[in-house]
Image (cartoon, rainbow, N blue to C red):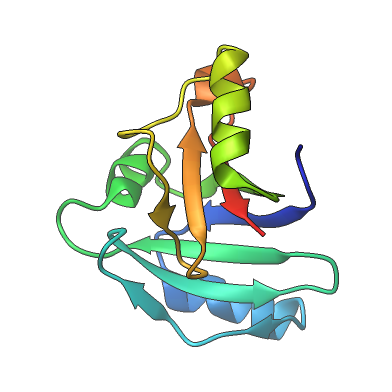
Amino acid sequence: MIGRLNHIAIAVPDLAKASALYRDTMGAKVSAPVPQPAHGVTVVFVELPNTKIELLHPLGEKSPIANFLTRNADGGIHHVCYEVEDIYQARDHLKAQGARVLGDGEPKIGAHDKPVLFLHPKDFNGTLIEIEQA
């Protein structure tokens, strides 16, 4: 069921500084900031040969990233995203296995314009998991 690693999302307190770190220090291809008002974040996409890194920064007062950064002032890994072929089949399988799907259980369109769901970190060794339809 689980497919390839799509991305690792890192919450950052300073998006420009984090972008420069990946672009200038590490030599990665880094996008311009992309506001995602529906998700309460601004995202910078870091392209790697085998996956992507998403740098997440709060956008708006209700941003879920703001709470994360309150607890982790220096930032840190927020979630890991895996691809699945069929998000509904994956959701139903995961729920049958006891995994908790966050929100109302219905896929939302994510930052890559594909359906996504998030799974409770307590069910996955303390890691917030995002599944994205490939």
Q: Could you tell me residue 29's position as x and y percent?
A: 70, 85
Foreground pick, 132 / 128 = 132
Give residue 113's position: percent from left, percent from top: 48, 70
Q: Report whether 41 appears left or right of 48.
A: left
Q: Nearer the viewer, residue 73 or 83?
A: 83
Q: Position of residue 123 (x, y in %)?
A: 57, 17
Quadrant of the image containing the C terminus = bottom right
Can residue 35 be seen in the rendering of this structure? Answer: yes
Q: Residue furthest right?
A: 49
Residue at image x 77%, y 83%?
A: 27
Q: In percent of the image, x 31 and y 58: which residue is there?
A: 39
Relative to 41, residue 5 above or below: above
> In the figure, is residue 123 to the left or right of 107?
right
Q: Quadrant of the N terminus?
A: top right
Q: Position of residue 46 (x, y in %)?
A: 64, 74
Q: In this view of the protein, can residue 75 be seen by the observer?
A: no
Which residue corresponds to the image point at 57% horizontal and 74% vertical from the top-left?
A: 45
Q: Quadrant of residue 131?
A: top right
Identity of the residue furthest to the top in this view: 98
